């Protein structure tokens, strides 16, 4: 397939380029575009044949449902059965922005979107290119992250090119995705709201609006193979670079010492070793490649850098990455969730 790459200005998206991409979507094509969370791979959410192309390009399991993106709050009404008062409160507090809300679906949502569930996940992104594109196309857009299934999500257009060039119709280059992690997912379809995936909108933010919010147990720890998770995506390996990832957790000095010892053991075995450090500790590691994901005092920066750095370790070709753990406060919950999954819950406590 011929993939067209379109460089679009974030602050004032060029109308002719937006129209080109919108036309591709209306005609049942696939378009990768930047959002404030990560790059998404979009298709017409109401066109089953178009949505199939997303699953094919990504190699995504068919039982993992997609998030539907809209450009105005009013567009929600025709996609769901009804909108509860609490869901309305979330929309006015956090939309446009990195929050996905799950509600009972209406009849116009095709099966392929929800993988057969009776609920649908909806988000109104804040990124100017995403919003212009969805508005111009005039249709709701299904869009998972624009990576090969299982790989770290793309935060720049080059990541999308690396994974999907030749497999999609258009890739929009609109710079760096600011949040760097996928949206927070909250299920509002049941009695008590349940947080299914942490993200840029934190648990604390949600509790301010809703009071009671359940944390789904599958979110922070490994789930057993025999459990059916509320969010099908939870059961899959995610965000994994080619290298093995090991998290080392504990008091800072102990972590630094333990990682340096582990690095030496692996290097003596002839492996190429990477360390994912923080600004505060980056100079203290000796390994083949040491990258910092940011300062421990700036978790937003760590979130923005995490997937980028995991992909960078693959580019330099390390066999194993030792990652220093980060605090779970605020957006730290989302960082740890992604890092835990990238490591397949391979965590050493010191
Ligand atoms: P992605 O688009 O790849 O970032 O993943 C979307 C996430 O939302 C996955 O973990 C899905 O399993 C989850 N999801 C989408 N729709 C639903 C739904 N109706 N109910 C529960 N989880 C959903
Ligand atoms: Mg994804």
Image (cartoon, rainbow, N blue to C red):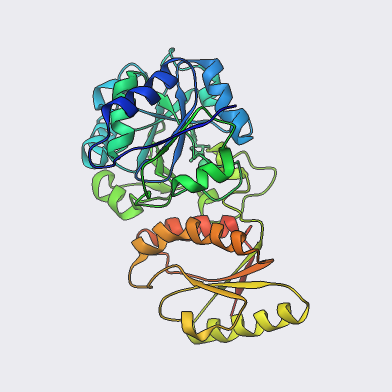
Quadrant of residue 294 in the image?
Answer: bottom left
- Image x and y of residue 306, in percent: 47, 60
Q: Is residue 124 visible?
A: no
Between 218 and 19, the one lying in front of the other is: 19
Q: Along the horizontal axis of the image, is 314 left or right of 197? A: right
Quadrant location, the C terminus: bottom right
Q: Along the horizontal axis of the image, is 140 left or right of 274? A: left
Question: Residue 109, relative to residue 88: is it above or below?
Answer: above
- Image x and y of residue 70, in percent: 33, 27
- Image x and y of residue 165, in percent: 56, 37
Question: Residue 296, relative to residue 148: is it above or below?
Answer: below
Q: Is residue 61 visible?
A: yes
- Seen at 40% across and 50% down, the residue is 199
Q: Residue furthest top?
A: 107
- Seen at 49% across and 31% down, the residue is 66
Question: Residue 271, relative to residue 332: is it above or below?
Answer: below
Quadrant location, the N terminus: top right
- Seen at 41% across and 59% down, the residue is 303
Quadrant of residue 266 in the image?
Answer: bottom right
Q: Along the horizontal axis of the image, is 246 left or right of 154? A: right
- Seen at 47% across and 79% down, the residue is 282
């Amino acid at each position: 397939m011929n993939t067209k790459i379109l460089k679009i200005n974030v602050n004032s998206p060029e109308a002719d380029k937006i129209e080109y991409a919108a036309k591709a979507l209306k005609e049942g094509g696939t378009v990768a575009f930047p959002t404030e969370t990560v790059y998404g791979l979009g298709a017409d959410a109401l066109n089953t044949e178009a949505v199939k192309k997303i699953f094919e390009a990504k190699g995504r399991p068919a039982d993992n449902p997609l998030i539907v993106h809209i450009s105005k709050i009013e567009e929600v009404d025709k996609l769901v059965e009804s909108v509860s008062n609490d869901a309305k409160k979330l929309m006015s507090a956090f939309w446009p922005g990195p929050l996905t809300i799950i509600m009972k679906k209406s009849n116009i949502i095709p099966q392929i979107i929800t993988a057969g569930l009776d609920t649908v996940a909806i988000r109104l992104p804040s990124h100017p290119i995403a919003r212009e594109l969805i508005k111009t196309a005039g249709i709701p857009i299904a869009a998972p992250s624009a990576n090969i299934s299982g790989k770290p999500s793309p935060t720049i257009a080059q990541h999308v090119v690396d994974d999907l060039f030749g497999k999609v119709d258009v890739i929009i280059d609109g710079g760096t995705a600011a949040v760097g992690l996928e949206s927070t997912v909250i299920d509002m379809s049941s009695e008590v709201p349940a947080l299914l995936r942490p993200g840029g909108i934190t648990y604390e933010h949600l509790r301010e609006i809703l009071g009671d919010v359940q944390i789904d147990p599958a979110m922070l720890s490994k789930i057993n193979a025999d459990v059916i998770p509320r969010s099908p995506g939870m059961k899959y390996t995610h965000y994994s670079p080619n290298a093995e990832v090991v998290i080392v957790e504990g008091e800072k000095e102990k972590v630094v010492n333990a990682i340096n010892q582990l690095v030496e053991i692996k290097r003596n075995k002839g492996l190429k070793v990477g360390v994912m450090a923080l600004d505060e500790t980056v100079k203290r590691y000796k390994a083949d490649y040491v990258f910092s994901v940011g300062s421990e005092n700036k978790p937003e920066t760590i979130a923005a850098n995490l997937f980028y750095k995991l992909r960078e370790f693959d580019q330099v070709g390390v066999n194993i990455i030792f990652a220093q753990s980060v605090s779970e406060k605020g957006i730290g919950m989302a960082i740890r969730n992604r890092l835990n999954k990238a490591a397949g819950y391979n965590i050493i406590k010191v």
